[in-house]
Amino acid sequence: MDSTQKVLASCCYFSIFVAPLLFPIIVYFVVPHEEVKCHAKKAFISHLLPFFCLFLIFLLVFVMNTPEQIGAIVLIAMLLFGFVNLVIFIWNIVKGVQLLVNE
């Protein structure tokens, strides 16, 4: 993979700052290089995970019946959602830097 492809693949991960879902999709469909496409797909999935977690939180809230259960689930879900977002954010930065640094 040449330097231009490395930068493009790392930008897919760094797009977590600007356009998390849009940039990896565009790169996936525009760039013909398979390794860049692989990184674009991984970045897209990692950017999509927080939305999936948010969907699960809403689903759990609708299943609960009592206000006490809803309050406890919302508190736990907010903490879990924050932790998942932090881990994904750090993972994307690490993967982007690894692509730029590794030869």
Image (spheres, rainbow, N blue to C red):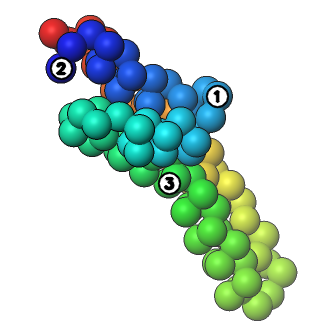
Left or right: 70, with 53 as reference point:
right
Q: Which is nearer the eye, 99 or 34?
A: 34
Quadrant including the N terminus: top left
Quadrant including the C terminus: top left
Any part of residue 97 in sight: no
In the rendered structure, which disc, 1 or 2, sits on the residue that comes first in sequence?
Answer: 2
Residue designated by label 1 = 18
Residue designated by label 3 = 49
Q: Is residue 90 above or below residue 48?
A: above
Q: Is residue 52 above or below residue 94?
A: below
Q: Nearer the viewer, mark 1 or mark 2?
A: 2
Report crowding for label 2: few under 14, some 14 to 19, many 20 or more residues within 10 A (C-alpha): few
Report crowding for label 1: few under 14, some 14 to 19, many 20 or more residues within 10 A (C-alpha): few
SS for tag 2? loop
**Residue drawn at x 65%, y 78% as measured from the top left:** 59
In the rendered structure, which disc, 3 or 1, sits on the residue that comes first in sequence?
Answer: 1
Disc 1 residue type (three-letter)? Val
Q: Nearer the viewer, mark 3 or mark 1?
A: 1
Please report contact status of discs 2 and 3: CB closer than 8 Å, yes or no: no
Left or right: 86, with 99 as reference point:
right
Report crowding for label 3: few under 14, some 14 to 19, many 20 or more residues within 10 A (C-alpha): some
Question: Residue 63: where, in percent of width, then height?
Answer: 68, 88
